Structure formats: structure tokens, C-alpha cells
Image: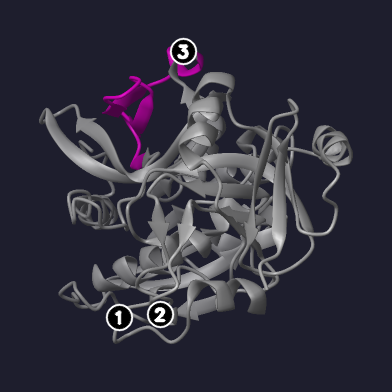
């Protein structure tokens, strides 16, 4: 039986479609992702907590679901929006169709939406709060709920996705040659993705993952060779308790940050962040590495970015730049072994354009000196 569903945006815009996941109602910031594939990884990326994702590619679900491709233990986003959910999953690795996964995990999916219209609207008006429902089909009621929903600005979503206890990670990346274990890295889990951990191991690191609320003293008790600051969801400006602990680690141990970790490191160095109009979400974002002028095809998922003007009086330099809008994609300290990138070098859109960053991290731990990122 085909069940109707409605997506209502806070500005009153309505999109009608058909449900293909769980029944119910959810709220979140509505964003779009331009990737043509990789929907299992997108669904399970903790950085999408409190967001609903619209896929720009029209047919999603055509290769089913393979749990080995997951980036975390479950789906974290609120809702999933597609033009067409494929009824056929052609893939020998697939264990179940997309709709079944959504139902099992209580995630609402909507198909039959004019996704081109939705994406054009978000690009012009900006990412905005929305409500997706299969139970309340009253448009005025849903718009009122969307307006009243919390949104992301000022919201700490990290506590909702981080682990509560430390653990060791030992699995390496299957498509990378594993190096002999040489370094002990403590990785903060702000919403960390599995492939980041695999690549740290593949680059010769023993990895201890700690909760987002871990203190600098607890981290240093492990006597780490390096500290990793992970990706994660929400507003980086809403995390002063994390920034304060990272600030205490500066100068004591080499550090590498990705995505939210990049934003946290920038704040710990005295910088600020701001919200982008509709963010960067997709697997085809061009990034230039300034020291070589080489362009990397990158995977990205963020709605906030670092304001480099707030760091102009600090010994910090821009290392990478987004070629679509000239926003900051990487920074490095000129005197200390610290660097970070806004995009996701553990993903494979290029396919491996950015994996060298993990090697730079190990070089930095080996020498204790800044590196040219």
C-alpha cells in the first residue's frame, strides 16, 4: 500500500511524496547531497545528526544495502529524501533493500519529491528547518511545527553521537597497505567515521578512541604520540567545553583534525566559525592544495566554516581552499605540529586524492615539527 508523506519547510514551502521508510514524523535541517552513489555511507555518517538529506541524483537504492559499507553503527540523520527509491537492488554484496533498512531503524524516507525544485529552493533561500511526516498531513500544522523545531545553530549534537567509554580500534583499511605500528594516537569521537579509524591503523597507528567529553588530562595520561580531532555534527560554536580541552593540548602533542575537528582546532587557536548558506555536502567538491596548486576531488559534509579573518593575527596559514566558493578547506600552524582540513580525506571520491594527509600526520608525529600540508 502506497502511503503519502509530506515535507514542510519553515518558510511554508510544501513537498508531497510517498513514504518508503518508517511511519511517523521527524524534524531537522534540510540539506542536499550531490553524490551519485555512497548512500549507505551518507546515511550512517554521524555528522548528519538532526538533518534531513535530499539526494540530487534521481535514482537511489539501486545497489541495496551492505553493512560493511557503514561509517558508524546506525543511521543518524532524521529523514531521507529522494526522487525515486529503486525497487530493484542489483548487487551481490547487498543484504537488504534501502527501504527495509529505514524501516528497521525507524527512519522516515520520502520519494516522489521534485528534488530539483527542492535543491534550487535551498540554494536560493538557504538550508532551513523542516518537518517530514506520514501521520500528520495538514500543511499548516506541519509548517508551524517546522518553525518551532530547534534547528542547528547553537545546538550541541556531539553529545548525541559520541561514545560514552574509551575503546581500542584495530581494523585496518582493506584497500590500503598496512604499515608497521609505530605511533599511539588518541582520537576524540565527536561523531567519528569508521574509515578514518581504518586509515589511521593502516598508517601505522595504534588507536584509542575517547569520548568527546574527555579532558586534556585524561588524553595525556595515555602518553600519545598524536591526537586526532574527528568529524561530527552540529554547530562548532556550541562546543566551548570541547574547545577548552583541545586548547590545553596545543603545544603538548601533534594534532590533526577533520571537518568538525578542523573547526574545533581553529577555535582553540583563537578563531571563529560561521554558518554557510547551504553548506557543502557531496563527493565532488574541488579543493586546491595551495603549496602545490594541485586540485583534489573531495568528499564534504559541513554547514559551518572557519573565518580566517579571525585568525589573521595568529601564526596560522591557509593550506587548502574550496574552488567553488573560496572558503577555507585547511589550515596549519606555522610553529607547532598542528594541522586540519574541512573535507573528508578518508572518503574516496578522487578516489584517493587526499589520503596523503594521514601520512603527513605520521610524519609530524615522527619529527615533532610542523609540516607543509
Q: Are marks 1 and 2 in contact (CB under 8 Å)?
A: yes
Q: Is residue 94 above or below residue 84?
A: below
Q: Which residue is mark 2?
A: 66
Q: Any mark on residue 309, and which?
A: 3
Q: Which residues are magenta?
A: 310-339
Q: Residues within 10 Å of mark 2 (few under 14, many from 20)?
A: some
Please provide percent x and percent y for residue 312: 43, 13
Q: CA distance from mark 3 to mark 1?
A: 48 Å
Q: Is residue 337 above or below residue 125?
A: below
Counting residues from the start of the chain, the first of labels 2 and 3 encountered is 2
Disc nearest the viewer among 2 and 3:
2
Q: Quadrant of residue 317?
A: top left
Point 76% across, 58% down: residue? 134
Assess whether residue 89 is covered by the magenta stretch: no
Counting residues from the start of the chain, the first of labels 3 and 1 encountered is 1
Please provide percent x and percent y for residue 248: 58, 43
Point 15% across, 28% down: residue? 291
Q: Which residue is mark 1?
A: 91
Q: Is residue 178 above or below residue 281?
A: below
What element does badge 2 sit on? loop
Please provide percent x and percent y for residue 234: 64, 43
Could one spot residue 269 in this view of the protein?
no
Point 19% across, 40% down: residue? 296
Q: Is residue 277 above or below residue 168?
A: above
Amino acid at each position: 500500500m502506497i502511503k503519502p508523506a509530506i515535507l514542510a519547510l519553515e518558510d511554508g514551502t510544501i513537498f508531497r511524496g510517498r513514504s518508503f521508510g518508517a511511519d511517523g514524523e521527524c524534524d531537522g535541517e534540510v540539506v542536499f547531497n550531490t553524490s551519485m552513489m555512497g548512500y549507505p555511507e551518507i546515511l550512517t555518517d554521524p555528522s548528519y545528526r538532526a538533518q534531513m538529506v535530499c539526494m540530487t541524483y534521481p535514482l537511489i537504492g539501486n545497489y541495496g544495502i551492505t553493512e560493511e559499507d557503514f561509517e558508524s553503527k546506525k543511521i543518524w540523520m532524521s529523514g531521507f529524501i529522494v526522487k525515486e527509491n529503486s525497487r530493484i537492488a542489483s548487487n551481490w554484496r547487498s543484504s537488504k533493500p534501502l527501504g527495509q533498512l529505514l524501516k528497521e531503524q525507524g527512519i522516515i524516507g520520502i520519494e516522489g519529491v521534485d528534488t530539483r525544485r527542492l535543491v534550487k529552493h535551498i540554494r536560493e533561500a538557504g538550508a532551513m528547518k523542516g518537518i517530514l511526516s506520514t501521520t500528520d498531513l495538514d500543511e499548516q500544522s506541519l509548517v508551524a511545527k517546522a518553525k518551532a523545531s530547534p534547528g542547528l545553530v547553537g545546538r550541541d549534537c556531539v553529545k548525541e553521537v559520541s561514545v560514552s567509554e574509551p575503546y581500542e580500534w584495530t581494523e585496518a583499511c582493506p584497500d590500503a597497505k598496512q604499515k608497521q605500528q609505530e605511533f599511539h594516537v588518541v582520537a576524540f569521537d565527536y561523531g567519528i567515521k569508521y574509515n578514518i579509524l581504518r586509515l589511521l591503523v593502516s598508517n601505522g597507528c595504534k588507536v584509542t578512541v575517547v569520548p568527546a567529553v574527555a579532558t586534556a588530562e585524561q588524553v595525556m595520561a595515555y602518553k600519545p604520540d598524536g591526537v586526532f580531532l574527528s568529524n561530527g555534527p552540529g554547530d562548532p560554536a556550541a562546543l566551548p567545553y570541547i574547545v577548552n580541552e583541545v586548547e590545553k593540548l596545543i603545544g603538548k602533542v601533534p594534532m590533526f583534525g577533520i571537518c568538525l575537528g578542523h573547526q574545533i582546532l581553529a577555535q582553540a587557536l583563537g578563531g571563529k566559525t560561521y554558518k554557510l548558506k547551504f553548506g557543502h555536502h557531496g563527493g565532488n567538491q574541488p579543493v586546491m592544495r595551495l603549496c602545490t596548486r594541485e586540485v583534489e576531488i573531495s568528499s564534504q559534509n559541513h554547514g559551518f566554516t572557519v573565518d580566517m579573518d579571525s585568525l589573521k593575527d595568529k601564526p596560522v596559514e591557509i593550506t587548502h581552499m574550496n574552488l567553488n566558493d573560496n572558503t577555507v578547506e585547511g589550515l596549519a600552524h606555522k610553529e607547532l605540529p598542528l594541522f586540519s582540513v574541512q573535507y573528508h580525506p578518508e572518503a574516496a571520491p578522487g578516489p584517493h586524492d587526499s589520503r596523503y594527509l594521514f601520512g603527513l600526520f605520521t610524519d609530524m608525529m615522527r619529527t615533532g615539527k610542523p609540516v607543509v600540508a
